[in-house]
Image (cartoon, rainbow, N blue to C red):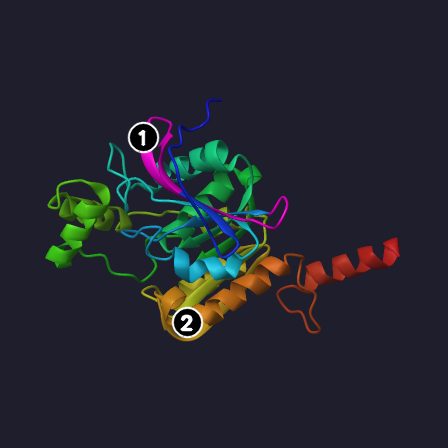
Amino acid sequence: MELPDIRSRQSTHHGWRRVVSHIDLRGHQVWSVEKRPLFKRNPEKVLLLHGGLSSTESWIDAISPAVKGFHIYAYDRTAHGRTKIRDGYYHFDFQTDEAIAYLEDVVQGPAHLIGWSDGGIIALHVALKRPDLVSSIVLIGANYHHDCGASHDVLTIEVKEEEKLLFAERSGQDPELLETVVRKAYEVWMSEPNLTVEDLKRINVPTLVLAGDDEPFTSDHTFSMYEALPLGRLAIVPGSSHFVVKEKRELTQSIIKDFLANLDYPITRWPNRRKEMTERLTQEDSANS
C-alpha cells in the first residue's frame, strides 16, 4: 500500500509536535492535522472527527486537552474546512469510506474515535464496517437515524456572506459554492443516517454517548442509542446544547478523560442495565482468583 504524499508544516509547542498539511489521500487532497506528545513513547492513537459543515480548526483546541498524552490525528472531510469537494461527497457511506482510508493510510491502525455530530455518526459506521480499526468511541451530540426529532428543512437555509468568505479563504473555492454544499448537507440529513438499534447492538467497543440536555434531537433518541450499545455509557451535560463541547468545555473534557482512562467494563454497587454482565464478570474473577 502506498503511503500518502505528505508535504508538512511542523512546529513544536507545549510538549507537542504538530504537523499540519494537505495530504494526498487516495487521489484527493485532504487537510490533515497530527499532534504527538514529545515525551511519551508509543502513545495510544486518537482520531478526531469534526461535525457537519464544520472543520478541524473549529474544535481541535476545545477537545485536545481531553486527550493529552495521546497521539492525535484529525482531518477535514471532503467539502469541509480546507478540503475541496469531489463527486459523491456528503453521503455517510462516502464519508465512512474516507475515514477508513485515513485510518488505514495515515493512522495506520486502530484508534479511539471521538466524533462530534456527523463525526459521531461516521464513527458508528466505521465501527460497524471495520471494527478492527476502532479501540473505543466517544459520540458527542450524535444521532444514529435521521428520524430523530431534528428539523432539516432546506427551505430555511440561509448562508451569510462572512461564511462564504471564510469558506473561500480556507478551501480556495468559489464562495458561492458554499450554498450548494449546505443544501447538499440538509438533503442528506433528511434521509440519512439509517442505522437501527439492531445495528448498534453489534458495536462491541466501549462507547461514551455524550450530549447536551437540549440537543436538536429528542432525549428518547439519545437514550435508545445508549441502551442499545452493549458497552455504552451515558453523559448528559446540564445547561448545554449541541455545542456542549464549547459551552461546557472543561466538564466535557473531564468526562472524556475519565472515560478513556477507565475503559474496562464498569462494575458498580447497584447495577441495573449492567446487572447480567456484572454478575458474569464477578463470577469469572472469583473463578480465576
Q: Is residue 73 left or right of residue 231?
A: left
Q: Which mark is residue 28?
A: 1
Of residues 77 and 71, which is closer to you in this image?
Answer: 71
Q: Name which residue type carries label 1.
A: His
Tell me, yes or no, whether the highlighted magenta stretch contains residue 38: yes
Q: Is residue 132 left or right of residue 77?
A: right
The image shows residue 183 at horizontal and vertical percentages of 17, 48
Q: Name which residue type carries label 2.
A: Lys
Can residue 157 be seen here? The reply is no
Location of the C terminus (image quadrant): bottom right
Of residues 28 and 123, which is closer to you in this image?
Answer: 28
The image shows residue 38 at horizontal and vertical percentages of 56, 49
The residue that appears at 63% across and 44% down in the rendered structure is 42
Q: Is residue 5 above or below residue 245?
A: above
Residue, far top: 1
The residue that appears at 47% across and 31% down in the rendered structure is 105
Of residues 135 and 190, which is closer to you in this image?
Answer: 135
Tell me, yes or no, whether the highlighted magenta stretch contains residue 265: no
Q: Is residue 136 left or right of residue 28?
A: right
> Picture quarter containing residue 24?
top left
The residue that appears at 19% across and 47% down in the rendered structure is 169
Dot 2 lies on which element?
Answer: loop
Dot 1 lies on which element?
Answer: strand
Real-space CA distance between mark 1 and mark 2, rounded to the nearest whole angstrom: 35 Å
Q: Which residues are magenta?
A: 20-43
* Mark 1 in CB contact with mark 2 (< 8 angstroms): no
Q: Is residue 3 above or below residue 116?
A: above
Residue under pointer 2 = 248
The image shows residue 182 at horizontal and vertical percentages of 20, 49
